[in-house]
Image (cartoon, rainbow, N blue to C red):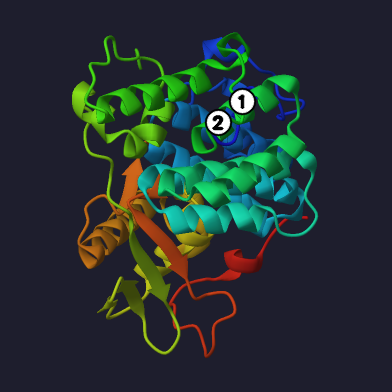
Amino acid sequence: MTPLPPPLGRWALGTPLDPAGRWSWRRPPAAWLTLLADGGRGVPQRAAILHDLGWAALLDGDVAAAAGQFEEGMGLVRAQRSARPWRGALLMGLATVDRVQGAFEASLSRAREALGGQVDAGVAFGAHLTLATTTRVMGDPLVSVRHHYAALRYAPSAEAAADVQALLDLVHPGSGRPDEARLSPGVQLRLALQDAESVLRSGLPVGLLPDVSGFGFEVLDESRSVPHVRAALGWPEPPAAPDEARLVTRGRLGVQRGLTFVPMRGEGRSLALLAYLIERGGAPWPRVADAVLGEGTEKALYGQVRYHVSRLRSLLGDSEAVRLRGGRLSLGPQWVWSTDLRGGQGPCLLDGPLDWLEAGED
């Protein structure tokens, strides 16, 4: 639990919604698809929808899809002033994706960034709860306790406070665990997994293990902290921490992969496409092609997109680094992506239009 996921569609004001139980991130309402495809109007609603779809995907256990939705939302935040109220919530979504993937430092950094400046109580609650859960999974109980108490101060409801209090008891035993009936199902499952882990670690038989069906996100989030339960239930090993990939555009042109620099020779349109996806998040391929590749027939532009995607995959040595699925381009969450485009020294060497970098609709 971190943060408490929103009621789906709650903030997409003015958007006709189906009841939440009748849609998922794979099958959103048609009205949402129309807004998401609209490049100009309804910017706050688009950011809200991307946030909700990201959480819907994450709750379903699809981390890659969640990362793509949150990143596209952050692209709106960076480019368009009217989307900026969603900055904190989207950062918390990305911080949660980072933690599930094992990128703990990145998770902490994003959650702290969400707390920067003036934030409302809802963002403060979610950010502190994100920090509390990440530091708990990292094995830092002292810092985790501090952020749990901070989250309690900002809890939006008695139900949310009960959930936080129950999670606090995991890192500060004896602080008081509320009655189970007051807790959300996801938190009940987390407590059951941790209790089963304690029993298995002591060498005692645990009896029936918790039923985890329907809790894809909670399983992903807790699997690192319950290795004995993971082995007993036959769960796969959690993913290793993502590799870092930084696009370098000044002084040299290429990608820094960990300690290795991989140069990109020839024209830099492939890296311009990569820059767009890092800075603006995943998007339909025609929107990316329009921003980065210029004019051409739909068939010709699609061919160029496929060429550049193939080139980037070869450059990074990972066939899943850049994805083209269902007409959308996105980046694989197994990498932590960054660029030197903002605030770098020296001229940018990218060969491609960069109007999109600062362009926005206020």
Check disc 2 and give the amino acid type: Asp
Q: Which residue is mark 1?
A: 176
Check disc 1 and give the amino acid type: Gly
Q: Is residue 354 above or below residue 165?
A: below
Q: CA distance from mark 1 to mark 2?
A: 6 Å
Q: Are marks 1 and 2 in contact (CB under 8 Å)?
A: yes
Q: Which residue is mark 2?
A: 169
Instruction: Work out whether mark 1 precedes mark 2 in sequence or the reverse, and give the earlier one.
Output: 2
Is 185 positioned to the left or the right of 206 in the image? right
Image quarter (top left, top right, bottom left or bottom right) of the C terminus: bottom right
Q: Is residue 289 above or below residue 141?
A: below
Circle 1 packing at 10 Å, graded few (<14), some (14-19), many (20+), is some
Expressed as whole percent of the image width and height from the top left, the position of residue 162 reads 65, 23
Residue at x 76% of width, y 37% of height: 154
The foreground one among 75 and 103 is 103
User: Which numbered marker is on residue 257?
Assistant: none
Is 272 positioned to the left or the right of 112 in the image? left
Q: How many marks?
A: 2
Residue at x 41% of width, y 53% of height: 297
The foreground one among 338 and 271 is 338
The foreground one among 174 and 192 is 174
* SS class, disc 1: loop
Expressed as whole percent of the image width and height from the top left, the position of residue 168 reads 58, 34
Can residue 39 be seen?
no
* SS class, disc 2: helix
Expressed as whole percent of the image width and height from the top left, the position of residue 87 reads 67, 50
Q: Is residue 261 above or below residue 326?
A: below
Can residue 151 be seen?
yes
Expressed as whole percent of the image width and height from the top left, the position of residue 137 reads 43, 43
